[in-house]
Image (spheres, grey):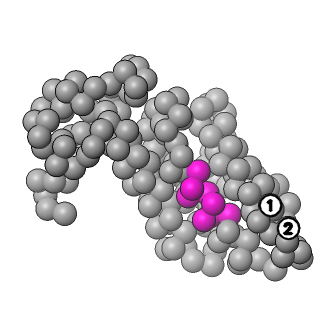
Amino acid sequence: MNQRIRLTKRLLHESLLDLLDKRAADDISVKELCEHAGINRSTFYAHYGNVRDVITEIGREITENVKDICRREGSDPKTALEHICEYLYRMKSTELILFRNHTDNELSYAFESLSAEFYHTGNYDIKPEDEKLTLAFVNYGMYNLIKTWLTENIEKTPREIADLLLDRILKAF
């Protein structure tokens, strides 16, 4: 992707997050987003079909960053989880906007791969027919714990959240 496209997308992402901070996604038109970003509508449509596509892309970028952290940390789930919590804490303002607008689906998908990664690095005695259900439980537990931590402004550090996830939820295996 060339620099001009990256700049255009960044302007649209930042403008959309600014608008979403004030009102719901369904109340934002392409015209309004383009005016706020200083982007021509034809340029917008060269990259997106509608405003929701921009939201999805923002969520995907966060998800990819979470997955990258998992890949970098490899077999060290504690360090990976700490770095993920630190990253999500740094992205808190963006996450809060996505949570408030019910547009955080991409992040929940990241936790599916994360819980599967942790599951496969351990030696758990789970029946094969129970594996999918157990992973769903752990996935949504991790995701909702982090969502609650960020949305309710619970005073815990990213390291404390990572420890809680490892010591409580992931021990459920």
Check contact, mark 1 vs mark 2: CB within 8 A: yes
Q: Which residue is mark 2?
A: 130
Q: Is residue 154 left or right of residue 131?
A: left
The relative height of residue 126 versus residue 65 in the rendered view (above or below) is below
Q: Which residue is mark 1?
A: 133
The relative height of residue 88 versus residue 152 in the rendered view (above or below) is below
Position of residue 126 measured from the top left corner of the image (x, y, whole percent): 88, 73
Amino acid type at image mark 1: Leu
Residue at the (16%, 54%) spot, across then down: 5
Q: Using the rendered image of the protein, determine whether residue 168 is visible from the camera's viewpoint.
A: yes
Q: In what quadrant of the picture does the N terminus appear? A: bottom left
The region drawn magenta spans: 108-115
Amino acid type at image mark 2: Asp
Residue 111 falls inside the magenta stretch: yes
What is the crowding at mark 2: few (fewer than 14 residues within 10 Å), some, or many (at least 20)?
few
Residue 162: which quarter of the image?
A: bottom right
